[in-house]
Amino acid sequence: MLLSIHDAHAALLVCVICAWLMLLWHILYPIIARCFVPTDQGYTHDFVPVSYFLPFQIMLYIALTFVSSVVYMSVYVVQHTHPLGVILEDGLIAIFAVGGLTVLVWCYLSYRSRLRRLHARSQ
């Protein structure tokens, strides 16, 4: 809190760094967890058991990282030629469109996989 009062540039930079670290952590965590714990021990490698929540969560972290990076660059790095609102609006629309489509496809595929497993188990 005192950092944001004393030096806004450093506080916004810390926000950007934390957003990128959270995004990388959520993308790399399942891969790292599978390296240390084999899959046959009943250990879950995701943060939640709902399969389609992971791409939704990553989509939100990408949006957070995009907003914090664009705001930091527009304020402190680049002399912007386009209005900041237009850049954020277009970028977030693209992120949510691609992310929403990914979540729908992921949900459909996990539903089909679950139905196949239930059907195979019932036979």
Image (spheres, grey):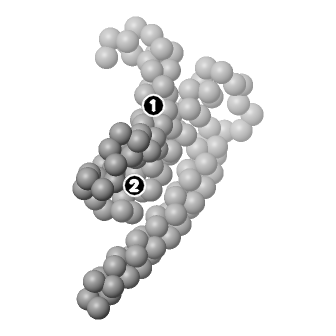
Q: Quadrant of residue 94?
A: bottom right
Judging depth in this view, the residue of 68 and 50 nearest the camera is 50
Residue at x 41%, y 79% (from the top left corner): 112
- Image-based side of 42 in relation to 4, left or right: left
Q: Which residue is mark 1?
A: 21
Quadrant occupied by the N terminus: top left
Please say whether residue 74 is visible from this viewpoint: yes
- Image-based side of 89 in relation to 108, left or right: right
- Three-letter code for the amino acid on which mark 2 is drawn: Leu
Label 2 crowd bin: few (<14), some (14–19), many (20+), radius 10 Å: some
- In this picture, is 41 found above or below 106? above
Image coords of residue 18 (percent x, y): 43, 28
Upstream in the sequence, badge 1 or badge 2?
1
Helix, strand or loop under label 1:
helix
Image coords of residue 40 (percent x, y): 30, 56
Residue found at the very far top of the displayed protein? 6
Helix, strand or loop under label 2:
helix
Image coords of residue 13 (percent x, y): 50, 20
- Three-letter code for the amino acid on which mark 1 is drawn: Leu
- Do residues under tags 1 and 2 come within 8 Å of each other at their CB atoms? no
